[in-house]
Image: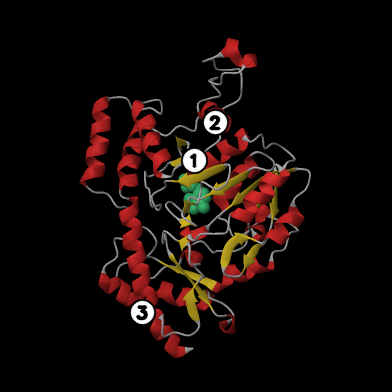
């Protein structure tokens, strides 16, 4: 049996043709027209005013935080259940990571009570991270952000096309970030896109993406229009080939979500007889994209780690096992005095199963049989 994990690069003729066409246009850099064309596909797809394509998810978060003026000594609040990539840009900016707990051991949304407690006069941004494509409650977080004037950044790298209450995640806050790395549902190898409805922020991010080159129409910048060396920026541009691939990948997003949802439903049905394992809660108006299926192991088993190990010996790799999933503040680089009991519980009580559209029926059956076999031994 081949290794079953959350990785499938879905490339067909439409992708190949799109990249070949881009090559033939002989404009390969991030200022090629195809980048704008990709952005013109992205914004209406998500019903967002603006979209900016970038060279990585980590870069896109870094870029957004620079645009939001996050700097040394500022605080940025994150859930400890986020991956390292979400928070590395905060470290790069020498800002302080502050961890607020999640609502419960089976949901990735912020505990509003803890979030409120963690806000100080130095809080410069709040980052939400819906893991494995599962929707989280956004209305309360947005309300807090608006009432305290703190921008909300949604790291939706794993949540392309995920919706809650008929609205795409990534369009609730001030900025939505979507990595388009190989494993993501819109895949350009390396890359990302950012969504925002804020015109000023959009232009700031365009400037920072391209070395700080001035584009904003502001009286104080008027004499510098088009110039470099006036304001800070880096190079966060995607290249033309990535944009070409992004266009055809986006066109397939809904079909991918349908196929993954079907696979997730098949797995859930096959595992429904096992009392101590179930999908984390999905509310009536939630539409996960099924980046992976997340299963919560009942507390009576104490931990999901043994089952993740058992499955890995059978070539079924849970992301939690692959990445040694743990609260970020337990890692040396992100040490903090914050303690988040729900996050600690969640990290050790879930496993993920692959659901991607490349899986065959016998592979889904193999996963069901392996977990059923484990269940017969505990
Ligand atoms: C939630 C999340 N944030 C950020 C990233 C970083 O994206 P990238 O690998 O494109 O830098 C990833 C994926 O790697 C991710 O899953």
Disc 3 CB within 8 Å of nearest ligand 1 atom:
no
Residue 345 disc label: none
Q: Is residue 298 left or right of residue 162?
A: right
**Residue at label 1?**
195
Residue positioned 30% across, 71% down in the render: 363
Q: Rate crowding at label 3 as few (under 14), some (14 to 19) or many (20 or more) other CA atoms within 10 Å.
A: some
- Residue at disc 3, secondary structure: helix
Q: Position of residue 313 (x, y in %)?
A: 41, 74
Rendered residue at 50%/57% (across/down): 165
User: Between 208 and 313, which is closer to the camera in this rendering?
Assistant: 208
Residue 314, visible in the rendered structure: no
Residue on which disc 3 sits? 270
Q: Position of residue 334 (x, y in %)?
A: 66, 53
- Rendered view: 140 above or below 205: below
Secondary structure under the numbered disc 2 in the rendered image? helix
Instruction: From the image, state whether disc 1 or disc 3 is nearer to you.
Output: 1
Q: Earlier in the sequence, mark 2 or mark 3?
A: 2
- Position of the N terminus, as image quadrant, is bottom left
Quadrant housing residue 8 = bottom left
What residue would you read off at disc 2? 199
SS of the residue under disc 1: strand
Q: Are marks 1 and 3 in contact (CB under 8 Å)?
A: no
Q: What residue lies at 38% left-to-right and 50% top-to-bottom?
A: 182
Q: What is the C-alpha distance between the residues marked 2 and 3?
A: 48 Å
What's the CA distance linking mark 1 and mark 3? Answer: 37 Å
């Amino acid at each position: 049996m081949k290794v079953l994990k959350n990785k499938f690069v879905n490339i067909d003729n439409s992708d190949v043709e799109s990249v070949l066409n881009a090559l033939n246009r002989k404009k390969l850099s991030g200022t090629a027209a195809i980048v704008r064309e990709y952005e013109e596909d992205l914004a209406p797809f998500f019903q967002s005013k603006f979209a900016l394509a970038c060279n990585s998810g980590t870069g896109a978060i870094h870029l957004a935080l620079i645009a939001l003026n996050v700097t040394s000594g500022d605080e940025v609040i994150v859930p400890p259940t986020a991956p390292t990539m979400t928070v590395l840009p905060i470290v790069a900016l020498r800002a302080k990571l502050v961890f607020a707990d999640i609502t419960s051991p089976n949901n990735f949304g912020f505990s509003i009570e803890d979030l409120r407690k963690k806000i100080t006069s130095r809080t410069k941004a709040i980052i939400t991270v819906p893991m494995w494509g599962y929707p989280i409650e956004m209305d309360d977080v947005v309300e807090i952000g608006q009432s305290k004037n703190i921008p909300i950044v949604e790291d939706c790298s794993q949540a392309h096309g995920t919706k809650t209450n008929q609205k795409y995640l990534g369009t609730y806050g001030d900025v939505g970030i979507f990595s388009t790395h190989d494993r993501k549902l819109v895949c350009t190898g390396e890359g990302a896109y950012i969504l925002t409805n804020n015109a000023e922020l959009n232009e700031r991010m365009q400037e920072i993406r391209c070395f700080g080159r001035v584009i904003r129409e502001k009286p104080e910048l008027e004499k510098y229009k088009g110039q470099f060396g006036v304001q800070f920026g880096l190079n966060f541009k995607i290249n033309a080939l990535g944009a070409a691939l992004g266009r055809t990948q986006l066109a397939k997003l809904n079909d991918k979500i349908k196929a993954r949802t079907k696979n997730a439903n098949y797995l859930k049905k096959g595992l429904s007889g096992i009392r101590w394992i179930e999908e984390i809660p999905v509310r009536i108006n939630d539409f996960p994209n099924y980046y992976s299926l997340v299963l919560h192991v009942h507390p009576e088993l104490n931990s999901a780690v043994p089952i993740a190990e058992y499955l890995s010996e059978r070539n079924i790799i849970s992301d939690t096992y692959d990445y040694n999933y743990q609260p970020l503040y337990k890692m040396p680089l992100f040490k903090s005095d914050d303690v988040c009991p729900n996050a600690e519980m969640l990290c050790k009580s879930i496993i993920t199963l692959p659901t991607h559209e490349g899986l065959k029926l016998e592979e889904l059956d193999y996963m069901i049989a392996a977990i059923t076999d484990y269940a017969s031994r505990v």
